[in-house]
Every structure is written in structure tokens, then in C-alpha cells.
Amino acid sequence: MNLKNELISLARGAQKASRVLSALSAGEKNNVLKGMARALLREKKRILASNRADLRAAREKGISGALLDRLALNEARVGEMSQGIFELTKLADPVGRELKAWRRPNKLVIRKVSVPIGVIAIIYESRPNVTADCIGLCFKSGNSVILRGGSEAYNSNKAIFAVLRGVIKKFGVPEGAVNLVSTRERKAVDLLLGLSGLIDLVIPRGGEGLIRRVTRKSRIPVIKHYKGVCHVYVDESADLNMAEIICLNAKLQRPGVCNAMESLLVHKDVAARFLPGLVRKFINAGVQIKGCSFSRRVVGRKIKLARQIDYYTEYLDLKLSLKLVGSLAEAIEHINKYGSGHSDAIVTEDSRSADQFLKGVDSACVYVNASTRFTDGNQFGLGAEIGISTDKIHARGPMGLEELTTYKYQIVGNGQIRE
Amino acid sequence: MNLKNELISLARGAQKASRVLSALSAGEKNNVLKGMARALLREKKRILASNRADLRAAREKGISGALLDRLALNEARVGEMSQGIFELTKLADPVGRELKAWRRPNKLVIRKVSVPIGVIAIIYESRPNVTADCIGLCFKSGNSVILRGGSEAYNSNKAIFAVLRGVIKKFGVPEGAVNLVSTRERKAVDLLLGLSGLIDLVIPRGGEGLIRRVTRKSRIPVIKHYKGVCHVYVDESADLNMAEIICLNAKLQRPGVCNAMESLLVHKDVAARFLPGLVRKFINAGVQIKGCSFSRRVVGRKIKLARQIDYYTEYLDLKLSLKLVGSLAEAIEHINKYGSGHSDAIVTEDSRSADQFLKGVDSACVYVNASTRFTDGNQFGLGAEIGISTDKIHARGPMGLEELTTYKYQIVGNGQIRE
């Protein structure tokens, strides 16, 4: 059997299993999830041994630093994977919610009810914990999942998958509910992305390159975010103490993540009071700043001159773009032009400015007087997160269990026909 | 300027206008819509003259019958277009609804608020009334629209568009809010479908061929339905009088539409009592039936033998596939395999069978004891419909104004930072 037929048969199995999954009760699903959480702890040694094989191979390839860290598992990290799955059992079942119900004049009763999406493919890079997270989230939401992880995590993913699929099997759930495409053939991803009648949704997780590749190739709907070019705008009416605290947090608390601030906009009328102190703190913290020429007149040559392309850039690092603006409207326009539709904040004491910003900025999450760092499923209280979307179709912002469902209309009559 | 740059510039204008549209109040939008409804009536003569030019050209090309009828406008049809836009003014504004709101332990207030999607492209075939319908629906939901109609309706679409864009302009709304791609160059569609940073959603409307072409080419999310292979399943416990009435309605009331029954499934235990009478009525009404060999044993050779491919077929005509099944489970499996996920009904007096069918059939609209013909925005009471989706992402079933919106999160704090 060639690879294409193999993947078609795998996706068919996933689709068939999804019909069974969609009918499981919350209790049945939670029992399986508890079994998964326990099994990860029980098989910790086996998982860590497989991970060591991946780490060895990665070091031989010269991989180091952050990439190696993302790949590495240890007892604590396996414990977190287990705990993550266990936490899902405490969340409400996203399936079977009555989203709306009404009765028509002809007495037809129409109910809009949440149901699983069906089969979800997840294409991801090096972090092996994604394997466990996604199996848990898709199972809880009644979806079959097809996983395709990065080649560096080949052995780790296989081990985690084998443990969790074993649990599925033990509980009598069709094995097609969870799938791992573990061939090393690279074209497997392209083939998967062509199976539009069998796979309902693709969620790519990883760097911008991976996500663009998946989006370009896919015949299946994709939900994604390419990058987070997040802004903080300090309004002329801002409480400047608060503004400084928020800016420092948004840039420094964890610079390598998508909801960190990459670009700071400051109203020109407060720049002279606000910027020199903040810039000093940023520079002391090791932040390299690129600013517009007006900002350099205020803080001098310790910051570099920004080029236009810098304002489009997601640094994921101790770097920051800076621009003075003449008005709130200019700030909004800048964010809509250069931003990525992810998370943007205004610091202001003026409620009309706040309102204008909330309405005018076309991003998934818009903030007033808070750090952009809160864009996160757990921080939002969703309980879990499968990703963040900067798309506008289906799901936007942090995606939890509810975003892994769709709906159907159930219509009950007593013989109604159309006249 | 070449066509590609022309379309990019048009889409940029649409995106820019969408920021203005998204901030309009319900009253402002309704005033423009009333202006549009009036203008269509006032400019009736001009629209009908353009339509006559299209009809002449179509006849010269040898187009006739249903296609010519779809293309033709008359005073009444222009009146309906006008009325359709006027009716939108009575519907609630789909933008600015608070879908959810909650407060986090750190006092952040998170609101999930409906907002327009942005820029929507509609690719459609010969019916010129789609031009007016889509401009009205997109405008009411705060979206800019880019229309690409069929070449047969070239002059009609241009005339309707000119009238409605004139109204937009008169009310001081940016003209980029409504756009018609009127070049005769066929590659315009492919170019549009590549503009993924500027257009947020594509809705193709027309035959399966058009929709498959659009889906294959698009880099932008597409919401669609290919076809409606709708089933009625007559359960062993059905009220057979009711079943007959529903079957006749679902097949005969309007055979050429997507929610008409194409395939009838009958439990074997009621086939001998139910089928002979119904088949006689269908044959008298001119319906050609293709049945499985078991059904032919019941009703004889007046029906042809069905091949497997017939069960996948959307006839849109006085034709019907027929199959006897041994159980409800077999019916559900048949529908999930051969159906199109559009609209399927069970006729039964057994509430457990009804429930099993509602849950087990993976279609946008599942019915108990009612005709499939109710799958329609107006029949559902949505007030208007831009199309029907058999996709599972974003919107499923009839799509009204709410389905033309997405949401954003508005988060308000008083200096919260992430620890």
C-alpha cells in the first residue's frame, strides 16, 4: 500500500471513529481521560527513554539552545502533560450544548446544538507535549485527531501516542479516534492536506514558516495564527505609572511568546514625560529599541532608527519597535496596518478613547489598561487551549474546547410540509 | 495597471471601507438600505433595459429554458429585490451583540462581542438578483463586499451595482464598501481567490462545478455547499400516512432545489404496506424511481434498478433513489456515507429512534417528522439568507446575518499585568 492510500485509510478510520466519539457521554469521556492521565505517569520511564533518543539525535545534528529545550522532557514535564489531561475532566462537556432553540409559527421546533467537528489534523513542530495536549483536547470535544509532529520528536511522539492509544483501546473506544502519522516521509503532510472529504479542520502549530506552508497547501479549512505583532499604545490621557508597568510586563515577562509586545506607540504629547524613564529601564533590561526619528529626538541616539519593515516584525526577543503618533486615530491606523490582528492594548484614562480603540482595532483581543500577555486560554479561564487564532472564520483569539465544536440544527415536527 | 494590481487596489479599498462600515450604527445602515430599496424601484427601467441586452446576447448564444429564466428580470422581480433589501431594515443589527462576558479573579472584564468579518467575496452564476441580495446582506452586517457575477448577467449586474453604489456614495459611505468585478477576463476569479490578506471570506453560489473550482483555487476560507443529496427515512414505527405526505412534499413541492429529497430509505418491515401506494403516486406525478433489488421485489419492475452511483446523485429533477434498509442503524450509516451533510429526515413515532437519528446523522439539518424542504433562511425565521453551508467550520446550514459576523474579545482592566 502506498503512502497516499495508507493515509486515506487512516483518515477513513478516523472519520468512522468520530461517529462513535460524538455519541459518548461526558462521563465516558472523562473516564478515558483519567485513564490517559494515569497511564502517562505509569509509563514515564518509557517516554523519557524515547525522548533521550530524540535528544541524542538532535545533539548529533548540532541542534542546541531553545530548540533543544523545547524538545526535552523530564519527570516534571511528563507530570504536567498528565495533569493537563486530568484537568480536562473537570471542564464541562462542550458537546450537546443547546446554543439556541425556537418554535416556528407552524410549530416546528428548531434546536441549534453543539456537536464535534469530526476529524481534526494537527501539524506541529518540536514540542512533544503537544501530542498529549491535542489528544486530550480533541477527545474531550468528541473529535478524532490525526497528529503529525516534527521529525526531531519522532521517538517521543511515538511513545506518548502508544501510551494514550493503548488507553483508548482498553476502554473499547475505536482506535481510529487517535492517530499519529509517524512515517519520516515529508510528503505525508501534503497528502494529508489534500484529504478534504475526510478531514474537517487543520490546526498548524509552530513557526510562521510551517504555518504558511500548511495554509498554502491545504484543501481543508485551516485555523491558525502566523505571528503576534502586538502593540501597546500609550494615550495622551494615560496614567503614565500604569503605562510603564504594563509596557515593562508586556515586553519583558516572557519575550519569546506571541502575545508579548513587539511595538510601542506613544502619543507625542506625553513622550517627553514618559519615554526617557521607560527607555532607560528597557535598555537596562537588555532591550534593543528601534524608534522613529521623532522618538530619537526625545530619547536620543541610544536607540536605533527604525525602518518600515521593523514595524511588521515579530521579534520574539529583547527587541522593540517604537513610534510616536499624533493621535489615537493614527495609532489605530498603524496597528491595523502593521499589526497581526492578535493582541493590542491602549493605556488611557479617557473612556471615549478606550471605546474608540476597542472598536477600531481589528484584532482578536483588544485591551484597555492591561498587558497583552493575558491572551491565553488559561488566563481567559477557558481551562485549556489548543491554539490562538488570528483568523476571523470560526474561531478568533484563544481556542478552547468550545472552539473545537460546530453545531447542527435538530428540527422536530409532527408532519409539517412546505406549502 | 494590470488586472492583478487593479484587483489588489480594489480589495484594499474594500478593506479600508470595512473599517468605516464596522463602526456604523444600526440606524445609519438602515437609512442606506432604505435608500437602496427606493433606488432600485426608481431605476427599474434602466435595470430592465440592461437585462434585455443580456437576454438578447444569451438567446444569440442559444441559451434557453431554465438558464434563461434565471437570468430574466421583470418589474415584479426588481420589486422583489427592492423588497428584500427593505426587509433587512426590520432585522436586528447582527453587529455589537455581547455573546458572552465574564470577570476574571484578577478583575479583568472579558467581553466577547460580535463584529463584521471584514471583506467578503461572492462568486456566483447567472441570477442577477444575487447582486442586490448580497449587497444588502453584507452591508447590513457591516462587511464590504466584492461581487463577481456570471458573464451572462454582465449588463444586469452592472446596472444593479451602479444604482446601489450610487446610494452608498450619496450617503457618504466609502464606495469601497460595495464592489463589482466586471471585467470579462476569466482569470479575475483566480486572482481574487489569491488575495488572502485582503479578503476574509469567499462564498461561492451556483452549480457544483463552480463551487469545486472556487474551493480548489482559493487561498481564502470558503463557505459553501456542493450539493444536497437529502434523504427521508421511513422507520418501522412511522405513521405511514404522515410518511407519505412528507415524502410527496419533499420530492415534489420543488424538485429543482437543494433541500428536495433525492433518496428514500424505507424500513423493510413496512415496505410492503407503504411502498406500493407511494410509488404509484410518484409515478403518476412523473417521478422516475431507481430502487434496490429488494424494493423491486415489493413494487415490481415499474422502477429501474439503482446502481451505487445513483445514491450519491443530486438529481434536482423528477427522479428518486430508493432503498430498503434492515434497521435504523443501517439507514444512518447509508445517509452518512452517500449523503451530502445537508438535510435528512426520519419519520417515526418512536422517540428513541428519533433521538438516535438526530444524534447519529452527521448533517447540517436533521428532521423528525417534517419535510426536508424547510432548510432555508426564511423558513427558519432568520429573515434573510446568504446561502446554505454543508461545511462544519464557522457556519452550518442556512446562513443569515449572524453568520456574516465574527467576534473579538474586548478586555478592560485597571493596570493588570501577568505575574
Image (cartoon, coloured by chain):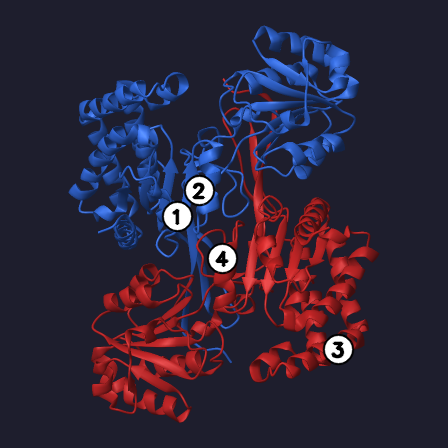
Chain colours: A blue, B red
- Label 3 Cα crowd, 10 Å radius (few <14 / some 14-19 / many 20+): many
- In the image shown, does A17 or A350 lie closer to the viewer? A17
Mark 1 vs mark 2: which is more N-terminal? Answer: 1
Name which residue lies at 79% across and 68% down: B38
Q: Name the residue beneath numbered marker 2.
A: A214
Question: Residues at badges 1 and 2 in contact (C-beta under 8 Å)?
Answer: yes
Q: Secondary structure at mark 3?
A: helix
| Residue B48 image label | 3
Residue found 61% across the figure and 62% down from its top: B186
Circle 1: residue type: Leu
Quick check: do tags 4 and 2 share a chain? no
Q: Amino acid at mark 3?
A: Leu
**What residue did someone put label 1 on?**
A193
Nearer the observer, B205 or B26 = B205
Query: Which mark lies nearer to you, 4 or 3?
Result: 4
Q: Position of residue B40 (x, y in %)?
A: 76, 70
Q: Tag 1, which secondary structure?
A: helix
Which residue occupies the extreme bottom position in the image?
B284
Q: Are marks 1 and 2 on the same chain?
A: yes
Circle 4 is placed at which residue position? B215
